[in-house]
Image (cartoon, helix red, strand yellow):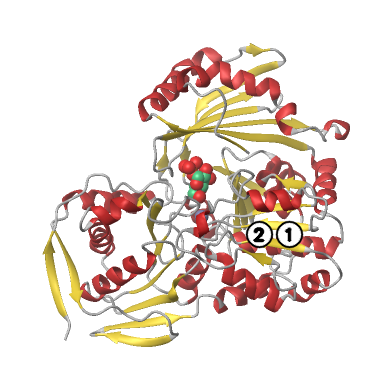
Amino acid sequence: MLIIQEIATHPFSDQKPGTSGLRKKTVVFEKNSNYLENFIQAIFNVVGVSGKTLVLGGDGWYFNYQAIQIIIKMAAANGVTQLLIGQNGLLSTPAASHIIRKYKTDGGIILSASHNPGGQEGDFGIKFNISNGAPAPESLTNAIYEETKKIRVFKIANAPDIDLSQVTTLTLENMTVSIIDPIVDYVELMRQIFDFSLISDLLKSGFSMTYDALNAVTGPYAVEIFENQLGAPKGTVVNAMPLQDFGGLHPDPNLTYAKELVLKMFSQNAPDFGAASDGDGDRNMILGKGFFVNPSDSIAILAAHASLIKGYHNNMFGVARSMPTSGALDKVAEKLNLKIYETPTGWKFFTSLMDANMITLCGEESFGAGSNHIREKDGIWAVLFWLNILAQKRQSVSDVVQNHWRIFGRNYYTRHDYENVEAEIAQHIMQNLLDTLPSLQGKEFGSYVVNKADDFSYTDPISDEQAIHQGIRILFDNGARLIFRLSGTGTQGATIRVYIEKYESDFVKQNMDSQEALKELILIAENISKIKELTHLDAPTVIT
Ligand code: G1P
Ligand code: ZN
């Protein structure tokens, strides 16, 4: 028999969800009793889940299983009608978004701290996605946060754990629990968009690829798609097993953390194509033989080739990029006569444009790209998009990128992160920058003249919701830009991100190293912000 308990609890004042839900050190969830329960009950209270169907799954890292069992019992106690749970508690973020949409559910809970380190020493995260498959909008996450500060009781069923290892349907008193295959629906969606037989021909033609799942959630998806369905040799997917601590790897696909892959792609016997995704499967990194594709360029290249892809042929509404993402996409939009939108950082700003059929493709500089097939960014989708382009063009990755620069010009781009800075110092640096904005107007820095300097804000064209303080922009006459913003996803200290960009239309000057090409602008950024002096760091912690 199911016994529903109402358990007294106390509110936590630190459960404010950031850019991608609530993300904390795992020990915070483990050591503070009812920390998870509080946040889940706050979601349930605000959303009103009685009689609803929800999706539940995560990336499989430490605490995933225990958290799922607690949420199942809380869902039953709160009157949820049906839960769709990925087998073994696994669902990549893109697959969860798709399942929420495909089965017309009322939303879902995704357990992941995305690209942060996992394990007992690492991070854990929870986010709520709404019925269109998109991350909850700010108005909802704010309401959930307000609820976490007041909450006094949570409801939980006194029931045994549920076996998540078999695809089956069970009942927990009045609630149906459907354990679903986490992969099939996603693969079917990819087949609708991309030409699998063309990609398969490429992979069987001597073209070699490697995909690094970094021991995170995309492993099983990648093995099914690249090896089983497209016919790439066994072993194409490396680190394919989702592990609770990612086998000690940091599941963030960038030049710093995906070291093994980067070394392989820059070695003598590098394969033709290399890719990786992050902990929950929404990010992507693309490499060619000895060649790294900057994510901002990647989005522009996908948009420029969309007409080659089955799912997007004659089917493009418009495109969007986050403000700090380079202007490479703008050049494509201009030439192809596509509408382009510049949004604040974070996927949720794209999704309302998608719902209104204003955009089809979008992306961020932070290794995120996606389309209106779901309402999250999608790592494996981006890899398939690249493979589909390569299968059509039969060119190397570097040729595709260099040809793109020749046609559209090159946006030299880099991001410098200063991590683990004391919060007060980071605030002080941002405040100083804000205070100097008026004096920067028209100022000359060598050959760079400031055209506009502002604090970026955005009004959603559909909801009219305003997002303010979304980053400081210094825009120069020649199209160069410097952007400063604070990260919203870190769990330790503050991270200041500095984004540096300049445009080069002359193709003879397009093959420089980007740090070299941007040297002068990097110094200007450091001088204006005094970032090294104030953080006592003599170099950024991560350079992309
Ligand atoms: C980072 C990225 C941002 C992305 C977010 C979630 O956020 O910069 O583009 O949307 O992760 O993946 P940040 O830490 O900069 O707030
Ligand atoms: Zn992620």
Marks 1 and 2 in Cβ contact (< 8 Å): yes
Q: Residue at x 61, y 77 (%)?
A: 188
x%, y% of residue 158? 18, 76
Displayed quadrant of residue 73: bottom left
Asked whether residue 436 is in view, the answer is yes
The residue nearer to you, when weighing 422 against 82, is 422
At numbered mark 1, what does the secondary structure look like: helix, strand or loop?
helix
x%, y% of residue 536? 48, 21
Residue 185 in the figure: left or right of residue 399:
left
Displayed quadrant of residue 359: bottom right
The residue nearer to you, when weighing 402 against 261, is 261
Residue 39 is tagged as none
Badge 2 residue CB within 8 Å of ligand 2: no
At numbered mark 2, what does the secondary structure look like: helix, strand or loop?
helix
Mark 1 to mark 2 CA distance (whole Å): 6 Å
Q: Residue at x 77, y 45 (%)?
A: 335
The residue nearer to you, when weighing 97 against 477, is 97
Q: Which residue does the numbered mark 1 point to in the structure image?
A: 386
- Above or below — where is 271 with respect to 322? below
Q: Which residue does the numbered mark 2 point to in the structure image?
A: 382
- Above or below — where is 30 with respect to 523? below
Displayed quadrant of residue 227: bottom right
x%, y% of residue 356? 52, 58
